[in-house]
Image (tube, rainbow, N blue to C red):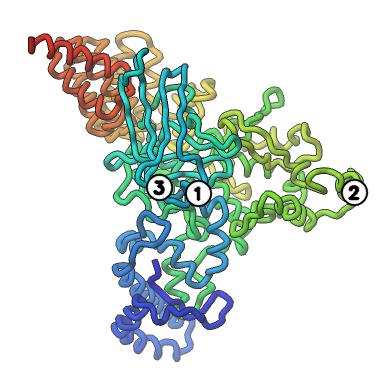
Amino acid sequence: MDYACPARQADGKQAKSGCQQNGVWARVRFMSKWVLPIGILICPLVLLGRSRWRAMARGLGLMGGAFLLLMCLSFQSKAPGTSAVADQSSAATTGYVGSKACSQCHASIYESFSRTDMGRSMSEISPDLLKKIPISATIFDPKLNRHFETFVRDNNLFQSEFETTVDGKDIFRDTRKIEWIIGSGANGRGAIVKQEDYLFEAPLSFYAKPHRWALSPGYEFGDYGFNRPILPGCISCHSGQPRVVLDGNGRFQNPPFAELAIGCENCHGPGLSHVAAAHMGDPGGSIANPAKLSPWLADNICMSCHQTGDARVLQAGKTYRDFRPGTELDDTLSIFLVPFSRESAPKDDLLEHYLSMRLSKCYLKSGRLGCISCHDPHVQPSQQEAPAYFRGKCMACHTEKSCAVPLALRQHKTPPDDCAGCHMPKRDVTVISHSVLTNHRIVAQAEEPFPEVAFHMTTPQLPDLVQLSANPAKKNVPSPLTLLQAYSQVILSHPEYRPRYWAVAEQLKASQPDNVQVLEALADEALQNKNAEGSARVIQYLQDAILHGATNPADFEELAQLLVAANRRAEAVIVLRQGIQLDPYDAELYRLSTKIYVALNKMHEACDVAAKGMQKFPQDDAIRGVMSRCQAASGGMGK
């Protein structure tokens, strides 16, 4: 993506790269003749000396620079290490230009960041990558009764899932090419496959600690085959610029990534105006610099990916890419927690780094500690360098006398004098096999209890949830629709919140009768009435939700089952057909369809759905069972 040569480097010195000779830069100079008339108009305005005219001149200049860059985008070539570069329309509408553009002025920072875990968060399969991981593995899972293999063929990485008979013959075998590897390898690497416009997780992941392939996280609970969708909330933090269809259940635009790994613009925001300003001789403006933001706004950038919570709710009309560094995260994405209790303080701190830091004495007493106080996103010390590196960060606030352990004793430990090792101990992650995590709550003793403030994080405006992303200096109240979606996620692990979920839905029933989330909540409430009247209301709410754009396959599945129970099977198959058209990779939709067609004695239709299902879900026992009946019936007819 080498499409521009900024006039000056960040330090103000004249750029010494040879990019003036770059063909793209030559095109910039050639096209600039069309912008000269704008410059002729600008000069008299600047000479007027009035601030408003100077501001207008600056704006016109930036518009001219941006215009040149957009023109150049149409000439750019594919950048090394990315699956695709941002196309002209993408840059024009989003302002993202890709990290290669940043590297023109910030080469050393770019090279350093590219070696960090974030800078290597996602990659294509390459000979160099294949040298870092075992390229073959054979695994049998007795609980699933499934065999798995990883192998390389023609410099491509593949995974297979299969089942065999007692004598070793294949019952089924599903082999897919791995398109991308997700993760830097610090704890492990996941694998992603592509089917049409959909991306899915592969069943095996590589784990760094044991240095071997094993079942991907979550696959111990069921056989998802190659059909576990890559969802926006996950991929937005594991890649640079994913082009996700928000409610597409794993569907992406083509190409699926404008930039693979996490890049400069994930933390600094879209760079188009900044590069344009650099061309106009102002390399310092038009971009977010976390080091110059308030601690709160700087932490918001990190919080967007390093803080999970019990619910993460996008604001109405927003996508994950709408968050702009330098603005409040809560304007785009709200993060909620169930309040702590002394009787059951949470022990799971997986991706709760911001919360953990916020409950540290260092944070509470300093008033200025933030993520970048200890972490420089551009630099990642090696495992050997880390103890001394982070000790240096601690010593920016503390002294040798701050530690109660004598220096001589500390220096005899391995590694010596390791502040983080003692006060931020690593632990095994129980929900992800073979993984370790640094606890970001800085403690004096390993078993130190939570501070008192941990039990007083709610507000009078929101007494039953902690809105962690809300600015503490403000007293904003989440909208009822945001709160409804928060409850809908919270009830998965805290069912006691269900009545509150229903109460908000009833509150919104009159004002937003066509809202899909409201209709789903009303259906959930009506479902509690175990009678014909309650079922009829659920059917009506779900039909209305689908009519107004519901995309959750569960809505179609639940509606179909209720219609079957009401002896309305013909309507049920129509609903399932709609669901399959909307989400062609949800196995339950196919299972229900074949089951209903069989009940209707429509074996031809059942076999047609089963055949299509077998192409997508060969591992599915139920669909394969229907297909076996179809083949047996066909064989009998042939005889």
Residue for point 33% across, 86% down: 36
Q: Nearer the viewer, residue 84 or 453?
A: 84
| Percent coordinates x, y for residue 480 in the rendering | 45, 36
Q: Is residue 490 visible?
A: yes
State the image coordinates of residue 203 (x, y, percent, origin top left).
43, 31
Residue placed at 82% from the left, 54% from the top?
A: 398
Towards the viewer: 147 or 183: 147
In whole angstroms, how far apart are the C-alphas of marks 2 and 1?
38 Å
Mark 1 → mark 3, Cα distance in angstroms: 24 Å
Q: Earlier in the sequence, mark 2 or mark 1?
A: 1
Label 3 vs label 2, nearer the camera: 2
Lateral position of residue 531 relative to residue 339, left or right: left
Label located before the other in sequence (3 or 2): 3
The residue singled out by tag 1 in the image is 121
According to the picture, the residue beneath numbered tag 2 turns out to be 407
Going by the numbered disc 3, the residue's amino acid type is Lys
Residue 427 lies, in percent from the top left, at 68, 34
- Determine contact: label 1, label 3, CB under 8 Å: no
Q: Which residue is mark 3?
A: 318
Element assignment for label 2: helix
Crowd band around label 2 with a 10 angstrom C-alpha radius: few (<14), some (14–19), many (20+)? few
